Amino acid sequence: MHRSACVTLLAVLLAAPAGCFYTTSINDAPRADIEILGLGPYYPKSSVMLSTFRSSDMEDGDDLTCTWSAYSCADDRCAARSVLQDPSTIGCGETYDVFLPEGDHRPILVNLTAEDRDGGTFSDQEILAVGNRAPTLDGPQANFPGAVDRVPVSVPIQVSVVVGDPDGDDVALSWSLVKPRGGGADVELRPVGDDELTQEFTPDLADVWVVEVTADDSFPGGRVTSDAMIPVEEDQPPCIAETLPAADPERRFVLERADGPRTFSVLHVDDALDPYPRTSDEPYVGDSAFAWQLASPDTGGQLVPVAGAAGAELAIDPSTYAPGDLIDLRVEVSDRVAREIPCDQAQPTCSLSGDSCLQRVTWGVEIR
């Protein structure tokens, strides 16, 4: 500084009246940064808790207020946005929750503005990426009518799934039927009802059929597939399960001539498709067929078909026979599948499978 300037300034100070000088202080801006409490990823139908760290103000200490707001972004850079949560002003030491909407995977922009008593402000931003959880898919599960784990050919099979989505997304289902070699071209899955959760098909071949279901919420990682292997077996032979009277090849049933006609009946035939009595009005369920034969002195002791006898019972009138006459009454049962009974005519019973499932029974009758 020049000497003349210093002299002038000193003269001014000496000439000034006695008293105090006041100057305006400079306000230091506060500081507050966003802190996310808890690790991501973050998903719809949940909340994210935020707070501040390094919040400070040299003049005002901790006496700061924080105004939070949240926006849904149209893209990852959040150039276009819409209000998700209106501004909320709380103490900078308090936590702030952002609630992520159901079924919404757009990024979330969080704004923070810290303000001190003197109007000084500081702003921070954070963009939260919203992830996706895959749908849940329970099934497919085959519903076997009248069976435990398999069904015969030509029985319709319904297959169902239960689907959900933890994020509340809309889920699209797609179904496919994997046919075994030789499966008919016209065998297809058909929806049952309007909810797309149940489909039905009617197998035309004994083998393993596969139903595959895919659930897709259209977001990354939101596709899940599951399948069911469905064994289909050949239609098994019908089984004569109960008769009246009980057919016992070891003894003869005695009929007294004075007792009048006696009815011999098949009470129950066990068969998946053609049972007796008929167990369902479903169109795929049919009826057992019965064939009766009778051997008596009139036939020379040879079994011959009984004309007109096609039902599950046949009556014998002992009064038309002489005391001591021996009669053999036989019934054979069949279903929709043509099968030849392999047993010799002399055998009173016959089983195609060689077990207790009988397709032939014979009553021995003695007239007295």
Image: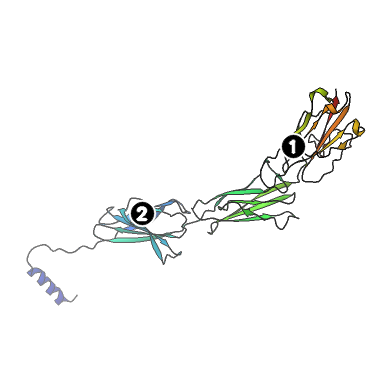
Residue 124 disc label: none
Q: Secondary structure at mark 2?
A: strand
Residue 208: x %, y % from top left: 72, 49
Please indicate whether residue 97 sits to the left or right of residue 189 in the image.
left
Q: What residue would you read off at disc 1?
A: 269
Say what amino acid the circle numbered 2 marks.
Thr
Distance between the Cα atoms at labels 2 and 1? 79 Å
Q: Which residue is mark 2?
A: 52
Within 10 Å of disc 1 (Cα), the crowding (few <14, some 14-19, many 20+) is many
Residue displayed at 74% across by 49% down: 207
Can residue 91 be seen from the camera position used here?
no
Residue toward you, 60 or 212:
212
Quarter of the view holding residue 263: top right
The quarter in which the C terminus is drawn is top right
Q: Quadrant of residue 288?
A: top right
- Residue 28 drawn above or below residue 235: below
Seen at 34% across and 61% down, the residue is 123
Q: Residue furthest right?
A: 300
Q: Amino acid at mark 1?
A: Val
The image quadrant where one finds the N terminus is bottom left
Give percent across and percent down for residue 67.
32, 57
Q: Nearer the viewer, residue 53 or 263?
A: 263
